[in-house]
Image (tube, rainbow, N blue to C red):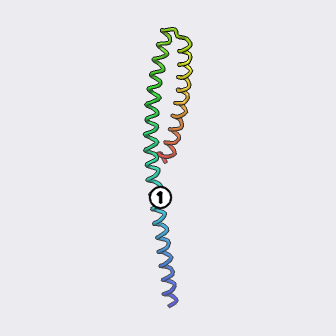
Amino acid sequence: TVLYDMVTVLCDTVTVLCDIVTVLCDTVTVLCDTVTVLCDTVTVLCDTVTVLCDTVTVLCDTVTVLCDTVTVTVLCDMVTVLCDTVTVLCDIVTVLCDIVTVLLCDT
Protein backbone atom coordinates (compact mmCIF):
# COMPACT_ATOMS: atom_id res chain seq x y z
CA THR A 1 0.00 0.00 0.00
CA VAL A 2 2.87 2.39 0.59
CA LEU A 3 3.98 2.01 -3.01
CA TYR A 4 0.40 2.44 -4.19
CA ASP A 5 0.02 5.61 -2.10
CA MET A 6 3.28 7.01 -3.49
CA VAL A 7 2.21 6.30 -7.07
CA THR A 8 -1.18 7.92 -6.41
CA VAL A 9 0.48 11.06 -5.00
CA LEU A 10 2.84 11.13 -7.97
CA CYS A 11 -0.05 10.82 -10.42
CA ASP A 12 -2.00 13.53 -8.64
CA THR A 13 1.04 15.79 -8.74
CA VAL A 14 1.52 15.17 -12.47
CA THR A 15 -2.16 15.96 -13.05
CA VAL A 16 -1.83 19.27 -11.17
CA LEU A 17 1.32 20.11 -13.11
CA CYS A 18 -0.45 19.34 -16.39
CA ASP A 19 -3.36 21.56 -15.39
CA ILE A 20 -0.93 24.39 -14.59
CA VAL A 21 0.82 23.94 -17.96
CA THR A 22 -2.56 24.01 -19.72
CA VAL A 23 -3.50 27.27 -17.99
CA LEU A 24 -0.10 28.74 -18.87
CA CYS A 25 -0.49 27.72 -22.50
CA ASP A 26 -3.99 29.20 -22.67
CA THR A 27 -2.69 32.43 -21.11
CA VAL A 28 0.18 32.65 -23.60
CA THR A 29 -2.25 32.04 -26.47
CA VAL A 30 -4.52 34.85 -25.28
CA LEU A 31 -1.51 37.16 -24.87
CA CYS A 32 -0.27 36.30 -28.36
CA ASP A 33 -3.71 36.92 -29.84
CA THR A 34 -3.89 40.27 -28.03
CA VAL A 35 -0.45 41.29 -29.27
CA THR A 36 -1.45 40.30 -32.81
CA VAL A 37 -4.56 42.50 -32.62
CA LEU A 38 -2.50 45.36 -31.15
CA CYS A 39 0.10 44.93 -33.86
CA ASP A 40 -2.55 45.04 -36.59
CA THR A 41 -4.11 48.15 -35.02
CA VAL A 42 -0.75 49.92 -34.72
CA THR A 43 0.07 49.00 -38.32
CA VAL A 44 -3.19 50.52 -39.58
CA LEU A 45 -2.73 53.66 -37.46
CA CYS A 46 0.87 54.10 -38.57
CA ASP A 47 -0.03 53.57 -42.23
CA THR A 48 -2.74 56.22 -41.86
CA VAL A 49 -0.27 58.63 -40.25
CA THR A 50 2.19 57.99 -43.09
CA VAL A 51 -0.46 58.81 -45.71
CA LEU A 52 -1.50 61.94 -43.80
CA CYS A 53 2.10 63.09 -43.43
CA ASP A 54 2.81 62.46 -47.11
CA THR A 55 -0.28 64.49 -48.02
CA VAL A 56 0.78 67.35 -45.74
CA THR A 57 4.27 67.28 -47.26
CA VAL A 58 2.82 67.61 -50.77
CA LEU A 59 0.53 70.45 -49.62
CA CYS A 60 3.40 72.23 -47.91
CA ASP A 61 5.63 71.87 -50.98
CA THR A 62 2.83 73.29 -53.13
CA VAL A 63 2.31 76.23 -50.75
CA THR A 64 6.06 76.89 -50.71
CA VAL A 65 6.11 77.07 -54.51
CA LEU A 66 3.09 79.39 -54.47
CA CYS A 67 4.70 81.58 -51.82
CA ASP A 68 7.84 81.87 -53.94
CA THR A 69 5.66 83.04 -56.81
CA VAL A 70 3.24 85.32 -54.97
CA THR A 71 4.38 87.60 -52.20
CA VAL A 72 1.93 87.34 -49.34
CA THR A 73 4.65 87.47 -46.73
CA VAL A 74 2.67 87.23 -43.49
CA LEU A 75 0.46 84.38 -44.69
CA CYS A 76 3.42 82.53 -46.18
CA ASP A 77 5.43 82.90 -43.00
CA MET A 78 2.53 81.45 -40.98
CA VAL A 79 2.14 78.55 -43.39
CA THR A 80 5.88 77.87 -43.33
CA VAL A 81 5.88 77.71 -39.53
CA LEU A 82 2.82 75.44 -39.61
CA CYS A 83 4.43 73.17 -42.20
CA ASP A 84 7.67 72.99 -40.23
CA THR A 85 5.73 72.08 -37.08
CA VAL A 86 3.73 69.39 -38.87
CA THR A 87 6.93 67.98 -40.40
CA VAL A 88 8.53 67.68 -36.96
CA LEU A 89 5.37 66.03 -35.58
CA CYS A 90 5.32 63.60 -38.49
CA ASP A 91 8.97 62.72 -37.88
CA ILE A 92 8.26 62.08 -34.19
CA VAL A 93 5.19 59.95 -34.92
CA THR A 94 7.12 57.98 -37.57
CA VAL A 95 9.86 57.16 -35.05
CA LEU A 96 7.25 56.18 -32.44
CA CYS A 97 5.51 53.96 -34.99
CA ASP A 98 8.79 52.27 -35.86
CA ILE A 99 9.54 51.62 -32.18
CA VAL A 100 6.05 50.30 -31.37
CA THR A 101 6.06 48.15 -34.52
CA VAL A 102 9.37 46.57 -33.54
CA LEU A 103 8.19 45.97 -29.96
CA LEU A 104 4.76 44.56 -30.84
CA CYS A 105 5.13 42.99 -34.26
CA ASP A 106 8.74 41.87 -34.60
CA THR A 107 9.13 40.05 -31.28
Answer above or below: position of 36 versus 25.
above
Residue at point 49%, 9% (across, down): 70
Image spot of residue 15 (x, y percent):
47, 74
Residue at point 48%, 20% (across, down): 60
Residue at point 51%, 42% (across, down): 100
Query: Label 1 belongs to which residue?
Result: 28
Answer above or below: position of 86 versus 41.
above
User: Splitting the image into 4 quarters, where does residue 62 fall?
Assistant: top left
Secondary structure of the residue carrying tag 1 is helix
User: Splitting the image into 4 quarters, where does residue 55 fall?
Assistant: top left
Answer above or below: position of 103 versus 52.
below
Type of amino acid at the residue the image marks with label 1:
Val
In the rendered picture of this protein, how many numbered marks are placed on residues? 1
Image spot of residue 74 (x, y percent):
56, 13
Query: For the residue carrying disc 1, how many other residues have a C-alpha within 10 Å: few (<14), some (14-19), or many (20+)?
Result: few
Image spot of residue 16 (x, y percent):
49, 73
Image spot of residue 88 (x, y percent):
55, 28
Answer above or below: position of 30 versus 45.
below
